[in-house]
Image (tube, rainbow, N blue to C red):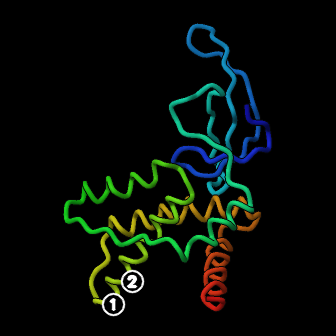
Amino acid sequence: MYQVGDLVFYGSIGVCEITGIISRTVEFRRHLKFYVFKPLYCLNYIILVPVDIRKVFMRPIISSSEANRLLDLIPTIGAKAYYNRKLNQLTEHYEAFLKTHECLDLIKLTISIYDKKRIADHKQQKFGSVDEKYMKRGEDLLFGELAAALEISKNKAAEYVAARLKLDQRIS
């Protein structure tokens, strides 16, 4: 069971802080305990989640050492741009990465879409709206968790990653 103050990665929302644990009466006088989740990056938003829920994914956020380990792996990740003219198949491909709820998969997703954007820009072609949507979603979840793990602002997370990658390129 999580405790008040814990940070968890919750479903498709991302990082949430547990701000309370309450009891509520539901369905025919049944008493249930609920976590009170406050998403870190959504203002004025609270989620009540049953303590015993198994339907929605929930896990502790990664540690700062794990965040740095994953960032060290980025230069070795060979995620390539994925192309498919059928938008439903492109969406399914991207959703598969999101549904694992793992930072490494979010990194792979983001790198592959960045690669696709770089190629489109180089060829002076339009970057697809589905690609744009999933790039933003992947970045949002990834930078949100990295920021929480590293105890920096979400805005600083992208800068931190970029600085780490530049440092890695100078060392290589």
Quarter holding the C terminus is bottom right
Using the image as rendered, state which of residue 153 and residue 74 is in the foreground.
Answer: 74
Residue furthest to the top in view is: 28
Does residue 44 sit above or below 35 in this rendering?
A: below
Q: Image point 73% across, 31% down: which residue?
A: 1
Instruction: Determine which of the numbered discs, if any, sits on residue 143 in the image.
Output: none
Q: Marks 2 and 1: in contact by CB < 8 Å?
A: yes
Does residue 1 sit above or below 12 in this rendering?
A: above
Classify 10 Å Cα crowding around label 1: few (below 14), some (14-19), many (20 and above). Answer: few
Task: Report the residue marked by disc 1.
Answer: 122
Coordinates of residue 107 in the picture (x, y in percent): 52, 65
Coordinates of residue 167 in the picture (x, y in percent): 66, 86
Query: Relative to residue 9, is residue 113 drawn left or right?
Result: left
Q: Image point 29% across, 89% down: which residue?
A: 124
Q: Image point 24% across, 59% down: which residue?
A: 87
Query: Relative to residue 123, is residue 158 drawn left or right?
Result: right
Task: Report the residue marked by disc 2.
Answer: 118
> SS for tag 2?
helix
- What amino acid is at disc 1? His
- What amino acid is at disc 2? Arg
